[in-house]
Image (spheres, rainbow, N blue to C red):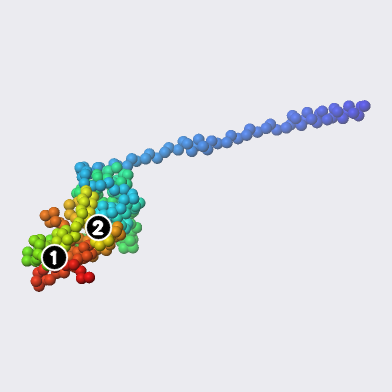
C-alpha cells in the first residue's frame, strides 16, 4: 500500500514539472495580403486617340451602296480606286469580300467616316470625287538598312574644344528628271471615212483614238435588222436581242464622269469574251471598237484604210 501511494506521488510530481517547463506556443505569422498589394498598383493612363477630321462633301445620290457579297463592275471600280490610293492590295475581281471590306473600313477611318465596312453614298463620293484623299497611315517603320547602320557606325566622334573644324564643301545631289505623266489619247472624228452596212450608207460619225476606230453599235444593228431591247438605270445600261435560238445581252456601267465603261457580253446568261471592252459616247450615241462588233452582233466588220470605208456585213453561211 505504501509503495502504490509512493508511485502516485512521483507521477504527480513529474506531470506538474513537465507542464511548467513546456515552451509557450509561438504565434503563427500572418500571411501577407498579396492580392491587396497588386490592387494598389497605379494604372497607366490611356491616351485618347486623336479624332480624324471628316471630309466635308455632299453625298452623290447616283452611287449605289456596296457591301460584302456584292459583285459587278461597281465593286471592281471601287477596288481599283482603293488600290490606286494604297488601301486595297487584293485581286481586282469585282467581288466584295473581306479584303474589300477591310480596305473600306481603313479608308473610312482615315477620312472620318462611319467605320462599318459598307461603301455607302458618302464613302463612295469621297473615294471618287474628293480632292482631299488621305493616304493610309500606320505602316510599320522599316528596319535600318546596312548602309544606314554603316553610316551611323562611321560617324566621327566630336573633336575636343579648341580643335579647328574643317570647312566641308557640300556636293550637290543630282535631281532626278521627272518622268512625263501618261495622258489619254484624244478622241478624233474621222471626217473622210464612210460607214457601209450591208451595202447601205447610213449617215453616221466615226471616231478614232490611237489605232482604234469606233463605230455606232446600235445604228449598225438597226441597219442590219437586229431588234434591240434596251433598259437603263443608275447602275447599269443593258441591251438584249435574239440571235437565232440564243438570247444575247451586253451591258455597261458609267464612271464618275458619266462615261460608259466596262462592256460585258452574255449569251444565254453565260459570260462571253470581248476583244475590246472600251466604249465611247457622243451625242447620246454609243460607240464600240470595230474589234468588238463581230463578238457582239455576229456581223463582220472590216476597215479599208485606202478607200476610207468601214464595212459591216453579215457573215457568209
Q: Nearer the viewer, residue 147 or 191?
A: 191
Crowding at dot 2, Cα within 10 Å, few <14 / some 14-19 / many 20+, comes out as many
Residue for badge 2: 249
The residue lying at 22 percent from left, 65 percent from top is: 298
Callout 2 secondary element: strand
310 in relation to 23, above or below: below
Where, quadrant-wise, is the C terminus in this rendering? bottom left
Q: Report the residue that reaches farthest toward the bottom.
A: 306
- The answer to whether residue 146 is visible is yes
Q: Position of residue 40 (x, y in %)?
A: 46, 36
Disc 1 to disc 2, how far (Cα)?
21 Å
Q: Residue at x 9, y 72 (%)?
A: 306
Label 1: state its secondary structure.
Answer: strand
- In this view of the protein, which residue sits in the foreground, 172 or 2? 172
Which residue: 11% across, 71% down? 305
Provide residue 221's location: percent of width, then percent of height.
17, 60
Q: Is residue 8 above or below residue 89?
A: above
In the displayed orientation, state which residue is furthest to the right: 1
What residue did someone put label 1 on? Answer: 197
| Residue placed most toward the observer, 70 or 311 | 311
Q: Nearer the viewer, residue 66 or 108?
A: 66
Query: Which of the image's four quarters has the N terminus?
Result: top right
Q: How many marks?
A: 2
Sequence order check, earlier mark of 1 and 2: 1
The structure residue drawn at horizontal position 26% and vertical position 58%, both measured from the top left corner, is 247
Residue that lies at the very extreme toward the left in this rendered image: 192
**Other-residue count near label 1 (Cα within 10 Å), few / some / many at <14 / 14–19 / ≥20:** many
**Residue 82 visible, this angle:** no
Which image quadrant is residue 308 in? bottom left
- Residue 105 marker: none
Q: Position of residue 303 (x, y in %)?
A: 14, 69
Amino acid at each position: 500500500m505504501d509503495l502504490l501511494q509512493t508511485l502516485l506521488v512521483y507521477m504527480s510530481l513529474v506531470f506538474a514539472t513537465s507542464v511548467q517547463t513546456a515552451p509557450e506556443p509561438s504565434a503563427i505569422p500572418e500571411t501577407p495580403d498579396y492580392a491587396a498589394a497588386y490592387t494598389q498598383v497605379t494604372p497607366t493612363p490611356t491616351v485618347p486617340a486623336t479624332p480624324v477630321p471628316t471630309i466635308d462633301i455632299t453625298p452623290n445620290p447616283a452611287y449605289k451602296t456596296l457591301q460584302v457579297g456584292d459583285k459587278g463592275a461597281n465593286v471592281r471600280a471601287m477596288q481599283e480606286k482603293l488600290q490606286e490610293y494604297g488601301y486595297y492590295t487584293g485581286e481586282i475581281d469585282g467581288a466584295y469580300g473581306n479584303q474589300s471590306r477591310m480596305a473600306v473600313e481603313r479608308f473610312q477611318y482615315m477620312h472620318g467616316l462611319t467605320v462599318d465596312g459598307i461603301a455607302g453614298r458618302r464613302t463612295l463620293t469621297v473615294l471618287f470625287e474628293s480632292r482631299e484623299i488621305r493616304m493610309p497611315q500606320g505602316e510599320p517603320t522599316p528596319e535600318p538598312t546596312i548602309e544606314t547602320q554603316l553610316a551611323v557606325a562611321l560617324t566621327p566622334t566630336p573633336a575636343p574644344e579648341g580643335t579647328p573644324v574643317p570647312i566641308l564643301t557640300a556636293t550637290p545631289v543630282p535631281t532626278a528628271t521627272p518622268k512625263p505623266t501618261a495622258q489619254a489619247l484624244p478622241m478624233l472624228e474621222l471626217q473622210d471615212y464612210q460607214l457601209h452596212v450591208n451595202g447601205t450608207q447610213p449617215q453616221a460619225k466615226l471616231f478614232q483614238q490611237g489605232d482604234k476606230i469606233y463605230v455606232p453599235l446600235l445604228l449598225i444593228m438597226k441597219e442590219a435588222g437586229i431588234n434591240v431591247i434596251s433598259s437603263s438605270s443608275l447602275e447599269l445600261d443593258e441591251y438584249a436581242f435574239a440571235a437565232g435560238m440564243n438570247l444575247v445581252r451586253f451591258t455597261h456601267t458609267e464612271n464618275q464622269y458619266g462615261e460608259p465603261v466596262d462592256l460585258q457580253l452574255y449569251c444565254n446568261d453565260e459570260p462571253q469574251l470581248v476583244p475590246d471592252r472600251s466604249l465611247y459616247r457622243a451625242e447620246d450615241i454609243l460607240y464600240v471598237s470595230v474589234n468588238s462588233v463581230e463578238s457582239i452582233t455576229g456581223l463582220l466588220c472590216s476597215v479599208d484604210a485606202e478607200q476610207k470605208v468601214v464595212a459591216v456585213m453579215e457573215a457568209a453561211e
